[in-house]
Amino acid sequence: MTTLGEIFRQYGPAYRAKFGAAMLPSHLRAMWDIEHCRTAALGGHLYHCDKCNQEVYSYHSCRNRHCPQCQQEAGQAWLERQQACLLPVPYFMVTFTLPEEMRELAHRHQKIIYDLLFRASAAALQELAADPRFVGGQIGLLGVLQTWARDLSYHPHLHYLVPGVGLTLAGQVRRAKKDFLVHVKPLAKLFRAKFRDELSKTDLCGQVPAKVWSKKWVVHCQPVGRGETALKYLAPYIFRVALSNKRLVKVENDQVTFRYQESRSRQTRYCTLPAEEFIRRFLQHVLPKGFVKVRYYGLFSPSYRPQLTQLRLHLAPPASRLMTPATVLEPDPSGSPRRPVRCPTCQQPLRLIATLKPRQERAPPVDLTRVFPGEVH
């Protein structure tokens, strides 16, 4: 099966030779990590099977959050924790999309624009939901940043998973109406206004075309049942970027073909790109170092944990109210515990016989202290 690591190992050197001087440190780091993931360069362990007398090499993973090989188990562990924390109420998925005219600016100043996107959207949704015509109280928001469309094009937007329940300042529980959270038209206007206010505090406001502030911004809200399905949808976006290895179809004549599902028709489509363009599309979704792409607001923020615990107890069936439910919602970056290594032939547990040292230093082949003009890191 074709993997992203193989594509980077084959075409990455030429890509860096051509564009390396203008590449971001985060992009160079991601490329190096993915190219060397689970290879001798990172070291590992040598195991022996006492039953079939076979030796098995197990090389270390890079643990880069953009590597499709490393994050599957962490994503599953996060999903299980979040499912255990779901409130017994209907949930909604609310999506905020950055206007097309602002995408170039967002790509050049990712930390600033992505952070404003989070702040403005969360503030707008909480303000409108607090209106007595809607929920009438403080709601909880789990927000996830996604920067790509299914064909890897640049399309920054936020998904929020929101329970249809809130708390008033007096501690009263308010529930959303059935299959309805808020009206999206006033929410979109409020989101646009708050984003403009936040952007005006930076030096970037003058770089936005004037027509952006008069056009309709896109906000979508839909009921998603009790939240389990929506969490399964969000989990892959938290622990990997853009695409998984299983979506890669082939590499032929210096072109990469991958499949995706068209959002409207739900039909499988195929996209074939020159290797250079494929790498460029992938790297534009690599986030700046340290940027937090999953955020919690309102009832899900740390400051509301006592109130959230009381809300869980209030919503829980009488028989379960004696139990104290878990309230920690933050993802655990360490992932799930490692499972015993087993023989690929007979499935028996393997015995560790040697530790393999890395063959080279774990660092990209460039100086990451360089300053790249025109970018906010």
Image: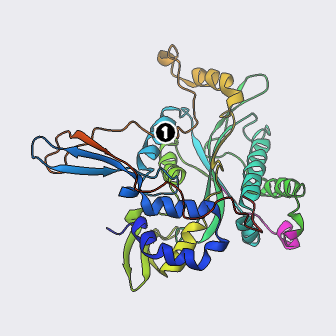
Q: Report the residue that reaches farthest toward the left.
A: 52
**Residues in magenta?**
207-220
Q: List the residue tagged with mark 1.
A: 334
- Furthest residue toward bottom: 253
**Residue 20 drawn in magenta:** no
Residue at image point 47% right, 50% down: 63
Q: Viewed as shown, does residue 167 lie left or right of 206?
A: left
Task: Tell me: residue 163, above or below residue 29.
Answer: above
Q: Mark yes or no: residue 75 visible.
A: yes
The number of discs equals 1
Q: Residue at x 64, y 67 (%)?
A: 155
Check the image and tell me how it is coloured: rainbow
Mark 1 nearby-residue class (10 Å; few <14, some 14–19, many ≥20): few
Taking the spot 57% from the left edge, 39% from the top edge, the residue there is 90
Q: Which image quadrant: the C terminus?
A: bottom right
Residue 137 in the image: above or below residue 293: above
Residue 178 position (above or below residue 6): above
Residue at position x 75%, y 65% from top? 375
Q: Position of residue 46 (x, y in %)?
A: 26, 47
Residue 28 image offset from top left, x and y in percent: 57, 64
Front-most of 116 and 217?
116
Res 193 quadrant in image: bottom right
Residue 208 covered by magenta stretch: yes
Q: Amino acid at mark 1?
A: Ser
In depth, the one of 345 and 256 nearer the eye is: 345
At mark 1, the secondary structure is loop
Q: Which quarter of the figure has residue 100?
A: bottom right
Q: Position of residue 54 (x, y in %)?
A: 14, 49
Residue 180: percent from the left, percent from the top? 65, 46
